[in-house]
Amino acid sequence: DTEVTQTPKHLVMGMTNKKSLKCEQHMGHRAMYWYKQKAKKPPELMFVYSYEKLSINESVPSRFSPECPNSSLLNLHLHALQPEDSALYLCASSQVLGRDSYEQYFGPGTRLTVT
Amino acid sequence: QQQVKQSPQSLIVQKGGISIINCAYENTAFDYFPWYQQFPGKGPALLIAIRPDVSEKKEGRFTISFNKSAKQFSLHIMDSQPGDSATYFCAASKRVGNQFYFGTGTSLTVIP
């Protein structure tokens, strides 16, 4: 099973709201990723967790706050977003690089609209 | 700085034809090169991947050709079908760092 699940599928939020995106995988992967993707662009890396610790933060504004409660779950907490944050938010997972298996699997994404 | 360069930006192919998408990289530390297929509104799906110790890998109608000396790799889709119409991204990663570097994407349209 190579499935990464994400909830919700769609989210509309106002600029003063607080919401969370959720991601789950049961492949035993110990690296989990958040990406942001705008239309017709490649995924843009936001955060990487390796063994449940934040290993990469690509200078993402503090209105995005990641959390990795355990090895299967990844959350992205959203607060005071701007309309330009509207995008497809993708979660992905892989083995920690350096091991034999590098495959990175993506979830279906959450389509976020900020009004 | 774009670590992986991808071309063409868009591609139109007749049904049954061969679709070819090219990528190039500079960092010789890259040692894993996947291709992803993405349909509108969906997440990227891993299609096929290659390591630099082989020059070609084939899975069904999809083939990766890899030229280590030229630092280039390409995706060939044989007998292209309308259902292959999607955006394709190449990517590269290093053995350490847990980071994948994506190309800019190619929008493929296969016309019946």
Image (spheres, coloured by chain):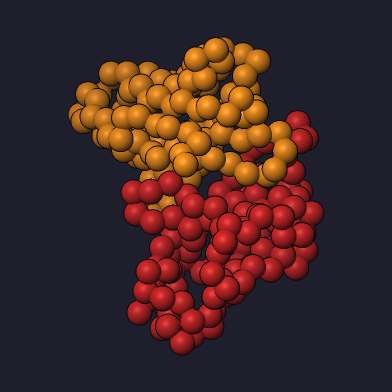
- Residue B62 visible here: no
Residue found farthest to the bottom: A16
Of A1 and A91, the residue lying toward us: A91
- Residue A52 visible here: yes
Residue A114 against residue A56 in the figure, above or below: below
Q: Return the x and y of residue A19 as percentages of the image width and height.
A: 54, 79
Q: Return the x and y of residue B28 as percentages of the image width and height.
A: 61, 25
Tell me what hue chain A is rendered in.
red
* Viewport quadrant of the N terminus of chain A: top right
* Viewport quadrant of the C terminus of chain A: bottom left
**Residue at 54% across / 75% down in the picture?**
A63
Residue B43 against residue B85 in the figure, above or below: below
Residue A48 against residue B5 in the figure, above or below: below
Q: Return the x and y of residue B82 as percentages of the image width and height.
A: 28, 33
**Residue at 59% across / 45% down in the picture?**
A105
Query: Quarter-wise, where is residue B89 in the image?
Result: top left
Residue B13 against residue A4 in the figure, above or below: above
Query: Quarter-wise, where is residue B86 in the image?
Result: top left
- Supply the letter of whichever chain is orange: B
